[in-house]
Image: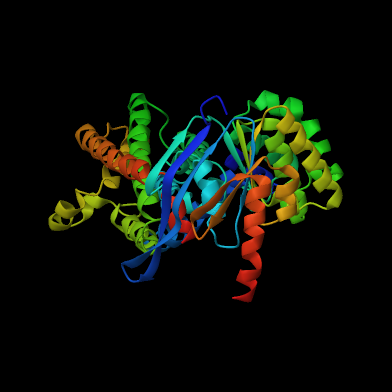
C-alpha cells in the first residue's frame, strides 16, 4: 500500500440510455457512486447480487467504457478482461483464436507462438485445440480465454465468474495458478457472487449493491456483512 | 488480417471465391443489361465491366464498413479497440479483393480491347480518390449506425439508388441536360468515368472533378473521425442497453 494505486475510482457512475420509444430514452444508472482503489499485487474481490453493476464495473476497469460521472485514474497500461462471452471468432480454431487474442492483449506474435504449447497444455484442450471454437463447450472457451490471458501477462487481470465455469479439476488448477500469480505480484480483480471463491482467493473485497459501494475492506469483515444481508434479501 | 484469413479458411475453395464471386456478379449484370437491353456488343460489355468493378468495390466496402462496429460487438466488449479502425478493417478486406478483380479486368481489356497506354497511368490516382470516398462514406455510416440502427435501411436502399444514378449501366452523357445538371453532384460519376476514360478510350480522366471528390471525402472523413472518437467508449453502452 506504499506505492500509488494502479487504478483509482472516485465517485464513479455509469448510465445507460434505455430506449423507451421513438427518439426517446430514459436514463438508467448501472453504477451510481463507486469509490475504491486497486493496488499493485493485490487480489481484489468484487461481490454483489445479480444486477448490482459488477459487469459494468469490470468494463470500466478494462477501459471499454468511460464513466459518465466521477473519475478514473488509470496507471495500469494493460488490463485484460476475462468473461464468459469471450471475443473469439467462432469459425477459427482454438490455436488461431489464441494467437489473435494474445495479440489483442498486447503480446507480440512471436511471443504468442513461443507460448502456444503452454497455452494448449494449460487449457487442457488436447486435440480440440485445432478444431473451430464453435465446437467448444462453454467451459472449454473459458479455459482457453483464461490460458491466453495468463500467458499474456497483463498488468491487471479482470475475471468475471470464470472460475465457476470449468470443472472441479480446472477450477482447482486455475485457483492454484491464480495464487501463483498473487505470489508473483500480479494484480487480479475477481467478480463473482460466490462467497467461497472470494474467501479462497482475495485479500480485499468490495461489496457493491445497486451500483453503490456498500463496504470495502478485508475479506472477512466484508463477507460477514454481505452474508448478513443475504437472508433479509431472500425473505423480502 | 484475421478477417481475411478467416474468410479464406472458411470456404474450402477459399481464395477462388474472391475471383468467382465478382465474376458471377458481373455475369449476372451482363446477362441482364448487356445482352437484354443493349443487344450486346463488345464495347457494351467493357463499358459494363469497367463500371461494375469499381462500383462493387464501393458498395461492398461501404456496406461492410457501415456495420463494422455492430458486427464486432463481441470483440469490443472484450478488449478496448479504437473504433476508428473497425471500418478500415472491412474496407481493407474489400480493397484486396478489388485489386484482384481489377487486375483481371485490365487483363481482359488488354487482350480483347485496346492494350495499355500512357493514360492508364491515371488509374492509381482514380483508385486513391475512390478509396478516400469509400473510407469517408464507410466510416461515417459506421459512426452513426450504432446510434440510430434504423438507418441501416437507409444505407442499404441508398446504395441501391446510387447504383442506378451513377452510370453503372448507361452513359450519363446521353441523358437530358437537366438530369446531368443534378447528377454532377454524384461523386461516383467522375470516378467511374475515371476508370472508363483510360481503359476504354485512352483518354485522361476529369482531374478537376476528381480533385473535388477527394476534398469532399477528406472533409467527410474528418467528421466521421470526430464522431467515432467522441463515441469511442459509448458505442458499447448503446449495444448493451
**Point 68% across, 23% down: residue:** A110
**Point 53% across, 37% down: residue:** B100
- Of the 4 image quadrants, the one containing the C terminus of chain A is bottom right
Q: Nearer the viewer, residue A102 or B109?
A: A102
Left or right of A53 on screen, residue B172: left
* Display coloring: rainbow
Residue B224 position within the rendered picture, expressed as x and y whole percent measured from the top left: 32, 43
**Point 49% across, 29% down: residue:** A75
Residue B16 position within the rendered picture, expressed as x and y whole percent measured from the top left: 63, 44
> Is any atom of residue B151 visible in this view?
yes
In the rendered image, the vertical position of residue B36 relative to residue A201, given as above or below: below
Residue B190 image-quadrant placement = top left
Left or right of A158 on screen, residue B216: left
Residue B84 image-quadrant placement = top left
Residue B82 position within the rendered picture, expressed as x and y whole percent measured from the top left: 45, 38
- Of the 4 image quadrants, the one containing the N terminus of chain A is top right
Q: Nearer the viewer, residue A230 or A115?
A: A230
Q: Nearer the viewer, residue B162 or A84?
A: A84
Residue B12 position within the rendered picture, expressed as x and y whole percent measured from the top left: 71, 48
**Point 77% across, 50% down: residue:** A140
Question: Number of labelled discs?
Answer: 0
Q: Residue furthest bottom?
A: A236
> Is any atom of residue B111 visible in this view?
no
Amino acid at each position: 500500500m506504499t506505492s500509488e494505486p494502479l487504478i483509482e475510482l472516485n465517485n464513479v457512475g455509469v448510465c445507460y440510455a434505455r430506449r423507451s420509444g421513438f427518439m426517446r430514452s430514459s436514463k438508467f444508472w448501472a453504477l451510481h457512486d463507486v469509490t475504491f482503489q486497486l493496488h499493485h499485487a493485490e487480489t481484489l474481490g468484487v461481490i454483489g447480487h445479480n444486477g448490482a453493476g459488477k459487469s459494468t464495473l469490470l468494463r470500466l476497469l478494462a477501459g471499454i467504457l468511460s464513466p459518465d460521472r466521477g473519475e478514473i485514474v488509470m496507471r495500469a497500461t494493460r488490463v485484460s478482461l476475462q468473461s464468459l462471452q469471450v471475443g473469439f471468432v467462432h469459425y477459427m480454431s482454438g490455436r488461431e483464436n489464441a494467437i489473435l487474442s494474445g495479440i489483442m492483449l498486447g503480446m507480440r506474435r512471436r511471443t504468442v507462438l513461443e507460448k502456444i504449447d503452454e497455452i494448449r497444455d494449460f487449457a487442457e484442450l488436447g486435440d480440440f485445440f485445432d478444431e473451430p471454437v464453435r465446437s467448444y463447450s462453454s467451459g472449454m472457451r473459458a479455459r482457453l480465454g483464461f490460458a491466453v490471458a495468463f500467458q499474456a501477462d497483463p498488468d491487471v487481470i479482470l475475471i468475471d465468474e470464470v472460475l465457476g465455469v470449468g470443472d472441479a479439476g480446472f477450477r482447482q488448477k486455475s485457483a492454484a495458478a491464480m495464487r501463483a500469480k498473487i505470489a508473483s505480484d500480479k494484480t487480479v480483480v475477481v467478480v463473482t457472487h460466490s462467497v467461497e471463491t472470494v474467501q479462497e482467493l482475495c485479500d480485499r473485497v468490495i461489496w457493491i449493491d445497486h451500483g453503490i459501494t456498500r463496504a470495502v475492506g478485508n475479506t472477512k469483515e466484508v463477507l460477514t456483512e454481505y452474508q448478513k444481508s443475504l437472508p433479509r434479501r431472500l425473505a423480502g | 488480417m484475421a478477417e481475411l484469413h478467416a474468410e479464406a479458411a472458411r470456404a474450402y475453395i477459399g481464395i477462388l471465391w474472391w475471383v468467382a464471386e465478382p465474376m458471377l456478379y458481373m455475369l449476372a449484370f451482363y446477362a441482364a443489361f448487356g445482352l437484354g437491353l443493349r443487344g450486346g456488343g463488345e464495347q457494351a460489355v467493357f463499358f459494363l465491366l469497367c463500371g461494375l468493378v469499381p462500383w462493387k468495390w464501393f458498395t461492398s466496402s461501404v456496406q461492410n464498413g457501415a456495420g463494422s462496429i455492430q458486427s464486432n460487438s463481441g470483440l469490443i466488449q472484450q478488449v478496448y479497440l479504437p473504433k476508428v479502425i473497425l471500418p478500415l478493417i472491412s474496407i481493407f478486406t474489400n480493397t484486396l479483393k478489388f485489386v484482384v478483380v481489377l487486375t483481371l479486368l485490365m487483363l481482359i481489356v488488354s487482350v480483347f480491347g485496346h492494350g495499355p497506354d500512357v493514360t492508364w497511368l491515371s488509374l492509381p490516382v482514380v483508385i486513391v480518390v475512390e478509396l478516400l470516398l469509400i473510407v469517408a462514406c464507410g466510416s461515417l455510416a459506421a459512426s452513426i449506425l450504432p446510434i440510430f440502427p434504423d438507418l441501416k435501411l437507409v444505407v442499404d436502399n441508398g446504395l441501391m439508388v446510387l447504383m442506378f444514378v451513377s452510370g453503372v449501366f448507361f452513359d450519363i452523357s446521353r441523358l437530358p441536360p437537366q438530369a446531368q445538371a443534378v447528377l454532377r453532384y454524384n461523386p461516383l460519376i467522375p470516378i467511374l468515368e475515371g476508370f472508363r476514360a483510360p481503359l476504354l478510350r485512352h483518354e485522361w480522366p476529369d482531374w478537376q472533378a476528381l480533385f473535388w471528390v477527394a476534398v469532399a471525402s477528406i472533409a467527410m472523413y474528418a467528421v466521421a473521425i470526430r464522431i467515432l472518437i467522441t463515441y469511442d467508449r459509448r458505442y458499447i453502452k448503446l449495444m448493451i442497453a
